[in-house]
Amino acid sequence: GAVVSQHPSRVICKSGTSVKIECRSLDFQATTMFWYRQFPKKSLMLMATSNEGSKATYEQGVEKDKFLINHASLTLSTLTVTSAHPEDSSFYICSAGLAGRSGANVLTFGAGSRLTVL
Amino acid sequence: AQSVTQLDSHVSVSEGTPVLLRCNYSSSYSPSLFWYVQHPNKGLQLLLKYTSAATLVKGINGFEAEFKKSETSFHLTKPSAHMSDAAEYFCVVSARNSGNTPLVFGKGTRLSVIA
């Protein structure tokens, strides 16, 4: 089945530094990947749609200069949290999928990356 | 726009008793619906999905859900809870009715299983 690998699983950084999170589709090519953010004890909120070879599409309220997304190949998308602040601390999850035979998407999620900004 | 409402933020059951996690959806077209489970500090795992085929969908670990269009519901059930079922459960609807699209998550229901 489709496998999505996310790295790092945990990262702690100082305020003001930038952190890069990688999302890889291991056994399939993903022209589209999605980045979600999950606050403690909250649901997942879609941040942006990452499109291979083009600019990401950000959801309303998500700062594109703060959360830089690069989808340089069909198997890799990266999310860079720039000039991180404590309020950026969160669980970030990526997903990718293949269109199912029924036409409905079935997304596979990475294991997530927990970012803690001190 | 598509949305899902999970009616209970927390459900507690005794081990061996049935589980019912409720979900209602809103969609402007025939929806694709999913249930995902998230164990503490883990990623998301797909339990089951409904994609306009059989209305009673069987998933992994003994879970199943029934799509009821008249009630706009997609409740998740399991006949007998196990301790390992304790986790956060998300009811999810596809954001758009085409190909590889993002998902809209409900707020989640935390399932506790008491020994």
Image: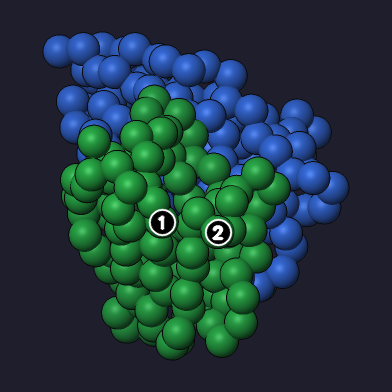
Judge by depth and name the residue closer to the eye, B90 or A59.
Answer: A59
The residue carrying mark 1 is A82
Q: Residues within 10 Å of mark 2 (few under 14, many from 20)?
A: few
Find chain A in the image and tell me its colour: green
Q: Tell me, yes or no, if residue B96 can be seen here.
A: yes
**Residue contact at pointers 2 and 1, CB within 8 angstroms:** yes
Label total for image: 2
Disc 2 element: loop
Q: Which chain is depicted blue?
A: B
**In the picture, residue A29 is in which quadrant?**
bottom left
Q: Position of residue B80 (x, y in %)?
A: 30, 26
Q: What's the mark number on residue B84?
A: none
Judge by depth and name the residue closer to the eye, A90 or B103.
Answer: A90
Q: Earlier in the sequence, mark 2 or mark 1?
A: 2
Q: Report the residue at 54% width, 82% height from top.
A: A52
Q: Is residue B51 left or right of residue A87?
A: right
Q: Position of residue A38 (x, y in %)?
A: 43, 39
Q: Position of residue B36 (x, y in %)?
A: 43, 44
**In the picture, residue B94 is in which quadrant?**
bottom right
B85 vs B2: above or below: above
**In the picture, residue A12 is in which quadrant?**
top left
Marked residue chain, label 1: A
The residue carrying mark 2 is A65
A35 vs B106: above or below: below
User: In which quadrant is the C terminus of chain B drawn?
Assistant: top left
Q: Report the residue at 79% width, 45% height from top.
A: B1
Disc 1 element: loop
Q: Amino acid at mark 1?
A: Thr
Residue at the far front in the pictured view: A16
Judge by depth and name the residue closer to the eye, A73 or A13.
Answer: A13
